[in-house]
Image (cartoon, rainbow, N blue to C red):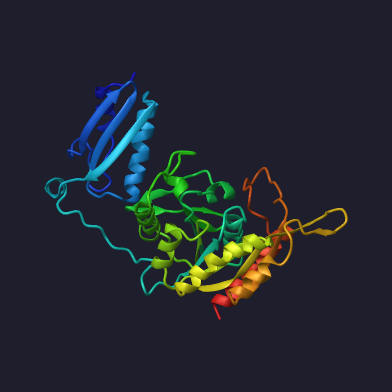
């Protein structure tokens, strides 16, 4: 059974990310309760709401659970300025050039859909990979904060590291990736309200060391909710790709996402119609499982074009390179994504 003394002993070895001193020495432990292996803690940090705070949270939870805690509850507050000055003087944070600055040369491409289940994340992952294969420097933000899936789809098992108070994104297939999945316990739900989600999304832009990027893709949550609205507000010069299936209802709903993009002065690069058909490997015959025409109808409504039609198929499974949703370059669908990537480059670099 874990005790208060045991918790105190463990917390002595955990440092405030800014002050680089034990959270016990800084007076950061404001509250501690232990009851029947449930540990409740309130910590004060020199800087709150940062990626470093999330890493510290993971560290505290991991250490205490290894010591026998069944559940750990954590709350954070701001450490008093007098305490900060006492231990380090005024904490200064060196500003790095932001991707959101007017001088940024990175092209933002948001991948959106009207509803879930149309393969938006699959399109995001494979388009990012295809752009990287064409020699572009590519980043990918899994902005679907409630339904994050990009790391699993790409077979990413490691987590980002923090260097000089900046998060270093995980790189896979030449794509730099950041996701909410890296900052929560496995399969834990994200029970946050809109303002907290917006702050987290802003951190993905400002607290991550992306390096030089040609393209930063954002896998948006489906629909036109808080997170999608935050993205449209943060990125006044973003381009968008709308994903739908051929089914008329899916295309009808996707039109709302496209209309939102246009109303916020985002340029719609085109429509990707996913699950367009199933092609028999034996006969070559195409079966239009979800109907026809949804993508074309949506493109017409948004005054744009269909830049790709993706059939139903599975990626080749390679035991040495586990990535459940990434199509290899030589795969027929990988070839289609390569053509879509070329169209995106032509549209954005002309």
Query: What residue occupies the far right of the structure in this picture?
Result: 283
State the residue in front, 123 or 297.
Answer: 297
User: What is the x, y in percent for residue 137?
Assistant: 52, 65
Question: As displayed, is residue 311 above or below residue 264?
Answer: above
Q: Which residue does the image show at 27% across and 60% down from the upper left?
A: 94
Q: Quadrant of the C terminus?
A: bottom right
Q: Quadrant of residue 79?
A: top left
Question: As displayed, is residue 179 above or below residue 306?
Answer: above
Q: Which residue does the image show at 63% across and 53% down from the upper left?
A: 326
User: What is the x, y in percent for residue 254?
Assistant: 58, 63
Q: Quadrant of the N terminus?
A: top left
State the residue in front, 218 or 289.
Answer: 289
Q: Is residue 98 left or right of residue 18?
A: right
Query: What residue occupies the far top of the structure in this picture?
Result: 1
Question: As displayed, is residue 10 above or below residue 106?
Answer: above
State the residue in front, 262 or 330.
Answer: 262
Q: Is residue 106 left or right of residue 55?
A: right
Q: Is residue 137 visible?
A: no
Q: Is residue 174 visible?
A: yes
Q: Which residue does the image show at 15% across and 47% down from the upper left?
A: 80
Question: As displayed, is residue 146 above or below residue 63?
Answer: below
User: What is the x, y in percent for residue 39?
Assistant: 31, 28
User: What is the x, y in percent for residue 106?
Assistant: 45, 70
Q: Is residue 2 left or right of residue 104?
A: left
Q: How many marks do you count on the picture?
A: 0
């Amino acid at each position: 059974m874990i005790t208060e003394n045991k918790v105190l002993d463990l917390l002595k070895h955990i440092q405030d990310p800014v002050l680089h001193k034990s959270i016990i020495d800084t007076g950061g432990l404001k509250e501690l309760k232990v009851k029947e292996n449930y540990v409740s803690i309130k910590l004060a940090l020199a800087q709150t709401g940062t990626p470093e705070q999330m890493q510290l949270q993971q560290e505290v939870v991991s250490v205490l659970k290894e010591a026998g805690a069944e559940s750990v509850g954590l709350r954070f507050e701001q450490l008093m300025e007098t305490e900060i000055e006492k231990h380090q003087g005024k904490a200064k944070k060196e500003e790095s050039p932001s991707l959101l600055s007017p001088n940024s040369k990175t092209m933002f491409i948001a991948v959106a859909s009207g509803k879930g289940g149309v393969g938006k994340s699959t399109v995001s992952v494979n388009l990012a990979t295809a752009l990287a294969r064409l020699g572009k420097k590519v980043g990918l933000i899994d902005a679907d904060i409630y339904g994050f899936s990009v790391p699993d789809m790409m077979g990413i098992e490691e987590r980002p590291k923090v260097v000089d108070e900046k998060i270093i994104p995980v790189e896979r297939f030449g794509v730099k990736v950041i996701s909410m999945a890296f900052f929560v316990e496995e399969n834990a739900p994200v029970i946050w309200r809109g303002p907290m989600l917006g702050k987290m999304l802003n951190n993905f832009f400002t607290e991550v060391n992306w390096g030089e990027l040609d393209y930063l893709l954002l896998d948006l949550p489906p629909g036109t909710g808080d997170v999608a609205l935050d993205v449209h507000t943060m990125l006044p010069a973003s381009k968008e790709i709308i994903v739908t299936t051929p089914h008329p209802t899916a295309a009808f709903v996707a039109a709302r996402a496209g209309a939102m993009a246009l109303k916020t002065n985002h340029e719609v690069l085109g429509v990707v119609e996913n699950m367009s058909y199933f092609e028999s490997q034996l006969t070559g015959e195409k079966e239009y499982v979800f109907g026809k025409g949804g993508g074309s109808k949506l493109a017409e409504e948004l005054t744009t074009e269909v830049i790709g039609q993706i059939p139903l198929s599975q990626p080749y499974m390679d035991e040495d390179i586990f990535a459940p949703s990434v199509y290899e370059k030589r795969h027929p669908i990988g070839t289609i994504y390569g053509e879509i990537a070329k169209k995106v480059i032509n549209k954005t670099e002309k």
